[in-house]
Amino acid sequence: MGKPTWTERVVSALRVRRFLVRAALAELLGTFLLVTIGNGSVAQVVLSREAKGTFLSINWAYGIGVVIGVYASWGVSGAHLNPAVSLTMAVLGKLRWVYLPCYVMAQMIGAFLSAVCVYIVYYDALGNFDGGTRAVVGVNGTGGIFSTYPQDYLSIGSGVLDQVVGTALLLCGVLALTDSKNNKVAAGMEPLLVGLLVFAIGTSFGFNCGYAINPARDLGPRLFTAMAGWGLEVFRAGNHWWWVPIVGPLIGGLVGGLVYTLMVALHHPEDEDDKPVHESPELQDVKVPGGGVANAAMEDLPSNTAV
């Protein structure tokens, strides 16, 4: 072979071969894409006073942000993009514990940098909106562009429950969509379906406190706003709300992982003698009413039958 060109030498020097470093870079980028697209939509809605978007458009943006972020990192790190997901995967034995701190740190950095990006892009719009006086909440409050804050009526206990439920739904859905022993999803469709799952959670449980369901997505930008002019009020607002979008999702992720494991994953057939009823060889030729066979019986159920 001939002498490598300078571009080949540069590429070779930059290429990362250690898995953990590659995974961390992928998690950082995926989280950055997710939160930048999501919070960018929040900024557009807030700073235009809802003239250029609504809560529904925010949900769509976050769902699409998840799709893009997951596609960007799926084949490298598994596209967790969320400390609650990473912790649950570690508990379930799907992620080595030694990798967990690097995953979480990468996700935090990605979310922090996303806040920097949104802030720079919308810097002039922020000044036009609040006259340069940064407020976390209120008529001219802009803290909610970057992190979540509760409605005035919401108690801390209800807020924790909100985050536990939302994140449990997320993890149940993610585990179901990635369970190859269940109803296997077509290759390459997982990111799209996870994005739709997040959209569904946002449109059903987003009213109380903005459905953070992701400690990195909330804490990373919150740290940035504390340093960028909003001050320590970002931690005091909402009756010191800041810890709820951290603790709630971590608990909720474990709850969702436990529920799916105990209800579904733990009971998958392990051999030919333990197949699901509709796949059992003994039933393949058994006739059922209507002239079908046993493994088609589910398709012959009346349309109003609950399955």
Image (cartoon, rainbow, N blue to C red):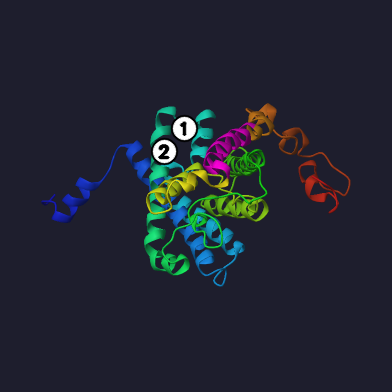
Label 1 sits on a secondary structure element that is loop
Which residue corresponds to the image point at 41% horizontal and 38% vertical from the top-left? 103
| Numbered circle sitting on residue 103 | 2
Q: Which residues are magenta?
A: 239-258
The question of residue 255 being in magenta is answered with yes
How far from the left and from the top, in percent, is residue 111? 42, 49
Marks 2/1: CA–CA distance: 10 Å
Task: Pick whichever of labels 2 and 1 is earlier in the sequence.
Answer: 1
Which residue is the extreme one toward the right? 289
Q: Quadrant of residue 286?
A: top right
Query: In which quadrant is the C terminus drawn?
Result: top right
Residue 31: % across, % down = 44, 49
Q: Report the residue marked by disc 1.
A: 95
Q: At x 54% / y 65%, what residue is drawn?
A: 45
Kind of residue sitting beneath label 1? Leu
Regarding residue 81, the answer to whether it shows in the image is no
Give the mark toward the camera: 2 or 1. Answer: 2
For residue 13, above or below residue 68: above
Is the Cβ of the residue at disc 2 closer than 8 Å to that at disc 1?
A: yes
Q: Identify which residue is drawn at 53% across, 60% down.
A: 61
Residue 65 visible in the snapshot: yes
Q: Position of residue 160 (x, y in %)?
A: 62, 39
Q: Is residue 213 left or right of residue 15?
A: right
